[in-house]
Image (cartoon, rainbow, N blue to C red):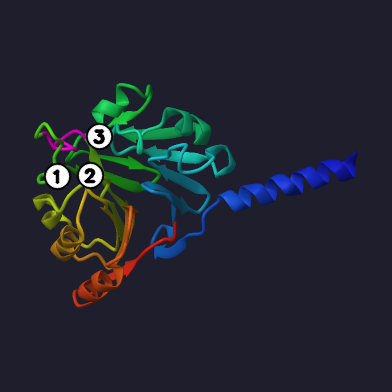
Amino acid sequence: MKKILLGLTLIFSLMAQAQTPKGDIFKTSLGELQVQLVKHGSLMLTLGDKVIQVDPISQSADYSALPKADLILVTHEHGDHFDKAAIYKTKKPSAEMVASAIVAKRLPGAKVLANGESAEWNGVKIDAVPAYNVANKRHDGQVFHPKGDGNGYVLTFGDFKLYIGADTENIEEMKQLKNIDLAFLPKNLPYTMTDEMLVAAAKSFKPKTLYVYHYFELDKIESIKKELEKEGVEVRVFKK
C-alpha cells in the first residue's frame, strides 16, 4: 500500500510540474523574481515563496495544479481575463485580490483600484494604470475597452519595475511610465495592438525587456525585435 501511495504521489507531482510553465528570472532588491506566461494573458509571478497570479482563467491552465496564489490581480471583466472558477482554484485562504471596480462587483473581497490609484502588498507597490482602446472599435462604433473600465498594473519590487499592459493600445499615458525594467504588451486584433502600435508603445517608454503576450500570431516578430533593439529594448516571447 505504501508503494502505491508513493507512486501516486510521484505521479501527481510530475503532473503538477508538467502543468507549471517555465519562467525567466530577474534580480530585484526584494529577491529573485520569476516571471511566467501561463497562456494568453495569464501570468504567474513568483517572489521567494510568494506567488502572484495575473488574470487566471480556466482556459489557460488547470489552476488546481499550479502553485496557489498569495495575490491575484485582475485587469478587467472580459472572459479571457476574469474567471471566478480559476480564481477560487488558485486562491489561498489568505490571498489578497486586486481588481477594477467592474470586476470587484462580481468578486467579493477584491480590493478596488481605479486608474491612478495605488496599494501595497508585502512590500510590493501596485499602481493601477490606464488600459483602453482608441482606434479599435466594435460594429456599433464603441471601443472594445473603454477608458477607465480596466487596469494595467505597474508592480514595483524595490528597485525593479514591472508593467503589465493588459488589453490596451499605444495610449498617451504610456509616455508617463518611467524606469520600467520589464513590460508585457499585447498584440492581437481587433482587441489590442497592431505590430506598428506595439513598436510605438515600446518606443514611448522604452522598457529594458519587453515580452509580447496575448497574441494570435507573430509573423513579424523578427522585424519588431530589430526595430526595438535600436531603442535599447530587448524583445522576448514565451512559446505558447
The 10 Å Cα crowd at callout 3, few under 14, some 14 to 19, many 20 or more, is many
| Residue tagged 3 | 113
Q: Which residues are magenta?
A: 142-149
Instruction: Provide residue 1's location: percent of width, then percent of height.
Output: 90, 39
Instruction: Provide residue 232's location: percent of width, then percent of height.
Output: 23, 75
Q: Is residue 176 above or below residue 146?
A: below
The span from disc 3 to disc 2 (Cα, nearest Å) is 23 Å
Residue situated in front as seen by the camera: 68 or 134: 134
Q: Is residue 61 above or below residue 184?
A: above
Side (left or right) of 24 relative to 106: right
| Residue tagged 2 | 191
Q: Does the magenta-highlighted stretch encompass residue 143? A: yes
Side (left or right) of 116 relative to 93: left
Badge 1 or badge 3: first in the primary sequence: 3
Characterize the magenta stretch by its predominant secondary structure.
loop
Residue 29 occupies quadrant? bottom left
The span from disc 1 to disc 3 (Cα, nearest Å) is 25 Å
* Residue at point 17%, 50% (across, down): 169
Residue 52 occupies quadrant? top left
CB within 8 Å, label 1 to label 2? yes
| Amino acid type, residue under disc 3 in the picture | Leu
Residue mark closest to the camera, 3 vs 2: 2
Instruction: Provide residue 240's location: percent of width, then percent of height.
Output: 44, 56
Q: Which mark is residue 136?
A: 1
Badge 1 or badge 2: first in the primary sequence: 1
| Amino acid type, residue under disc 1 in the picture | Asn
